[in-house]
Image (tube, coloured by chain):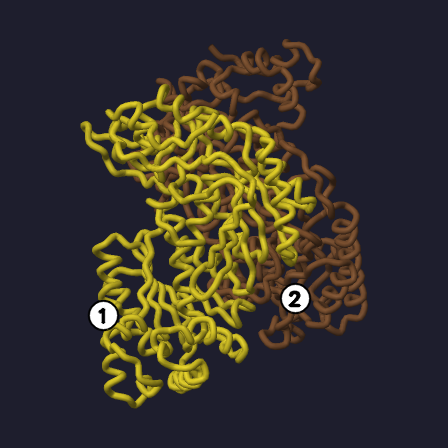
Chain colours: A yellow, B brown
Amino acid sequence: MAAAPPARELTQNPLQKTWEPYDNGLPAGHSAQRGVCMTNCPTLIVMVGLPARGKTYISKKLTRYLNWIGVPTKEFNVGQYRRDLVKKYKSFEFFLPDNEEGLKIRKQCALAALNDVRQYLSEENGHVAVFDATNTTRERRETIYKFGEENGYKTFFVESVCVDPEVIAANIVQVKLGSPDYVDCSNDEATEDFMKRIECYKNSYETLDETLDKDLSYIKIMDVGRSYLVNRVMDHIQSRIVYYLMNIHVTPRSIYLCRHGESELNLKGRIGGDPGLSVRGKEFAKSLAQFINEQNIKDLKVWTSQMKRTIQTAEALGVPYEQWKVLNEIDAGVCEEMTYEEIQENYPLEFALRDQDKYRYRYPKGESYEDLVQRLEPVIMELERQENVLVICHQAVMRCLLAYFLDKPAEQLPYLKCPLHTVLKLTPVAYGCKVESIFLNVEAVNTHRDKPENVGVDRSREEALRTVPTHL
Amino acid sequence: MWGCRRRGRFPQGRRCRVCMTNCPTLIVMVGLPARGKTYISKKLTRYLNWIGVPTKEFNVGQYRRDLVKKYKSFEFFLPDNEEGLKIRKQCALAALNDVRQYLSEENGHVAVFDATNTTRERRETIYKFGEENGYKTFFVESVCVDPEVIAANIVQVKLGSPDYVDCSNDEATEDFMKRIECYKNSYETLDETLDKDLSYIKIMDVGRSYLVNRVMDHIQSRIVYYLMNIHVTPRSIYLCRHGESELNLKGRIGGDPGLSVRGKEFAKSLAQFINEQNIKDLKVWTSQMKRTIQTAEALGVPYEQWKVLNEIDAGVCEEMTYEEIQENYPLEFALRDQDKYRYRYPKGESYEDLVQRLEPVIMELERQENVLVICHQAVMRCLLAYFLDKPAEQLPYLKCPLHTVLKLTPVAYGCKVESIFLNVEAVNTHRDKPENVGVDRSREEALRTVPTHL
């Protein structure tokens, strides 16, 4: 029974305020700081399914979600590799099962993509790779599984099965007609060709089987999420992926994001606190009510934080709303209710550190944007489940939510523009999200502070405050 | 907290993180005997109550035991036993009646109807009952053919059943196996085609795979996620607080202090204790506060820091003594004693908030096997309440003293608790609820239960 070594010294990381052990003055890696060790070994997600079953839609969405929650993820679309290699798509005949030339090229593309997967996961610190191709034969899937094993990846299959002709037709309209493959075709020509393309795969399609594939880890999604078959979930990340996939849907809807009306502290250039609305803020609330009415939204859900200013805003709508504590504004800790000038006065070092890494910077006794994303994850999950929703929240919170929908990376997230009195209407379309920005015509202060040029701890007061927006 | 007016099911001023249940949910268990239905019912009920969804389970076997005082043999369950069938139907209806009362009259949100429900006919009766009363019905079926699993279940929970109190283990096992046979011929498992319009989850081989159909709303989605994360692999969960801190010594709450001399002693004792326990693949989790990390450091093994394991945020009262809180915020202090679970510190949190933020910890604890969680008093109370099924009123008063490890081991339908004091003295930080919680109480009445400190 060995005695435990003497406890190491702890120092607090000045940016993230986390306690880290030091050995002889050098940082010692012994603890993982994130919520939980997501991935001990990298994960290879393998899509499975006939064309137009939503594989790329799922790949992109899943990749976006995983990156947002902090798991480095990248998707590899084999069709894209094919388009890069074969400059001009001619017809479905490329995909005929007896087209030797086609088969050769397609295999070459799959291998090129797998090679890039290997580089991403084994050399570039990627945690999850999504291999997006039809992978409809057991033989192809075995090849990929062996590749995963050889490289020490955990493989998880995601199959989408759908026989509803209406769904397939809608998919073709949404994402195939506009594909580079059909840029010179009429819609009818494109649809006809694509249907024949699907036929090329059908004869050799071997769906994941409960018996034959009982030792694989997979989720089989049937009829766009009506039912799921889940087999051998191995670890935390696979469990989260399954939960996410089981909550997303494709029913058309819109998500409206806006901040509370202008508050009394906004006017004074102060951050945080729990103030009420200013006169103009109340005006905005009325304008918002009118706007929502005019939009004539079916079954709109309204969510607010538990801070007075968002609730006051919602009250003007005259409809039921739900309060979420996790939608509260970022906690600025010791800087709560200060102006930027006061922060520079009292905490110049903190102010500089924040500008150096605004995403990871945690206020003393407060939070970081990184913390915000963690606590907003249940909101995103519920937004995925819901249909039409209006979220009345706060600047930092809205930036996090927006970054999820628009796939903005951590570096850009804290600088996304979310001005007061402006509603962002987000509508999923094709593989992404359409954004409409509607300013409701009630003036408000600007609360957006750009990243200054000089972020060094030895900068002058003037350099630090140069980008502070005007206030009373 | 800013009150809001909400029309609908909830009383005025109730604010909910998310509207879990527009209409009540009826969960219907399905499966042959010894497939884990009661285990799942009880566990699910415990989880839902902990996250704040009023849930109750209704075990039809219990109704049968209350009605038929003495169990004779498996013959009661023979498919042609008219008397038996009559009594069993009577019990099912009595249980459904209680379900109706709970959901429609007593503000219950979820009822778990625990019986075999192995025929399509029986399930249709229940589904109609749900429809008539405006409930959403969700089926949970457990399918298992592994004889080892079934034998283990019988040993764990059937041999000790009141039904077999006068039998030897062999007699009990033999009778129970025949009981299972009584159900097999008429068993109609949930079918992908015939039952395609029902909402259900089919759990196969103790969680190796799942078939999920038509999840209708948030609560069903959460139930599915929970059921897909639990397992039955034997393991233990160790809960303890950080070693005694400098602020503990002074009777101050919160803050981010380091360990006292005795606290560091405890950390060493903890390391020794963990070594002696010889635990397979132990995971160690801490909060992001210095005192838990210092404690973990002494173990000399990798550990993971979770921000959500941080102690309850006492807001404006951070780093105060109870005397100072009484001095500066006597009204707040009284309100806290009136409802310690729901009370939120100004600019801080409540126990109710804590439970919300600890839910991912519970979910991950369910997924994991052997884990040591080094946390804080309020946090540990919340986690303990989950494992020991303690209601909200008791949760903030659970005893979680410093320098004491609680070893939790799942057994049968519950959790065995072993309390191990690691023999390093520490201050007492437990403040009982005082007799007088009125806002007009005296300073002395308010401070009577404050534990001694420097």
What amino acid type should be assigned to the residue bearing mark 2?
Arg
- Secondary-structure class at tag 2: helix
The residue shown at (67%, 10%) is B442
The residue shown at (70%, 63%) is B73
Nearer to me, B72 or A146: A146
The residue shown at (41%, 42%) is B371
Q: Where is mark 1, residue-wise?
A: A112
Instruction: Please report, as a chain letter, where disc 2 is located.
Output: B
The crowd level at tag 1 (other Cα within 10 Å; few <14, some 14-19, many 20+) is some
Residue B186 place in picture, x, y as percent? 67, 74
Residue B3 place in picture, x, y as percent? 67, 34
Instruction: Quadrant for the N terminus of chain A, please.
Output: top left
Q: Is A124 on the left-hand or right-hand side of B338?
A: left
Per the rendering, the mark at residue B402 is: none
Q: Where is mark 2, residue-wise?
A: B179
Depth check, mark 2 against mark 1: the one in front is: 1
Q: Are marks 2 and 1 in contact (CB under 8 Å)?
A: no
Residue reaching furthest to the bottom: A98
Instruction: Please report, as a chain letter, where disc 1 is located.
Output: A
Q: Quadrant of residue A218?
A: bottom left
The residue shown at (64%, 33%) is B2
Nearer to me, B39 or B429: B429
Residue B139 place in picture, x, y as percent? 63, 63
The number of callouts visible is 2
- Secondary-structure class at tag 1: helix
Q: Is A439 on the left-hand or right-hand side of B18?
A: left
What amino acid type should be assigned to the residue bearing mark 1?
Ala
